[in-house]
Image (cartoon, helix red, strand yellow):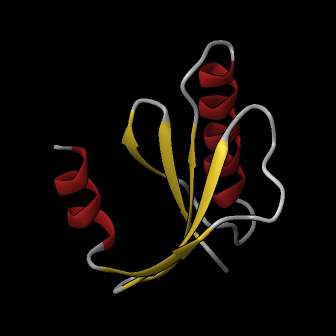
């Protein structure tokens, strides 16, 4: 199910890589896709879920004022963001 949702949003994934260092609250993956480059951030534990959702909300709000890439919610606590 999750794989189908992801493919519908960002299409085919050509390649992926991981940051040299991961933070302790989320896991990030860099994706090169049919629709461009994305960063996938995912969390599994509270309170990190709330923090990631809040981060996505703040970026979406700022996107109205300046040119930022707004997150795409795939599931409740998994977000993709188009790389600039």
Where is residue 40? Give x, y as percent: 54, 57
Q: Quadrant of residue 14?
A: bottom left
Residue 4, above or below 42:
below
Depth order, front residue of 26/75:
26
Which quadrant would the N terminus be assigned to in this image? top left
Q: Is residue 72 left or right of residue 75?
A: right
Residue found at x 75% / y 67%: 66
Residue 61 place in picture, x, y as percent: 66, 46
Figure check: 79 above or below 44: below
* Residue occupying the point 80% across, 34% down: 24
Determine whether 9 is above or below 25 in the image. below
The residue under the point 66% across, 59% down is 63
Which quarter of the figure has residue 42?
A: top right
Q: Quadrant of residue 33?
A: bottom left
**Horizontal and vertical percent for residue 81?**
56, 62
Is 54 left, or right, of 13 in this rendering? right
Please count the marks in the image.
0
Q: Position of residue 5 (x, y in %)?
A: 22, 52
Q: Residue at x 62, y 38 (%)?
A: 57
Looking at the image, which residue sits at the far top? 46
Q: Is residue 31 above or below residue 8?
A: below
Please state, as top left, top right, bottom left or bottom right, where the C terminus lies in the image.
bottom right
């Amino acid at each position: 199910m999750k794989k189908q949702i992801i493919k519908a949003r960002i299409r085919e994934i050509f390649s992926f890589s991981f940051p040299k260092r991961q933070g302790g609250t989320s896991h990030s993956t860099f994706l090169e896709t049919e629709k461009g480059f994305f960063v996938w951030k995912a969390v599994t534990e509270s309170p990190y879920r709330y923090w990631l959702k809040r981060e996505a909300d703040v970026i979406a709000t700022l996107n109205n004022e300046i040119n930022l890439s707004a997150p795409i919610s795939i599931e409740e606590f998994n977000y993709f963001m188009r790389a600039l």
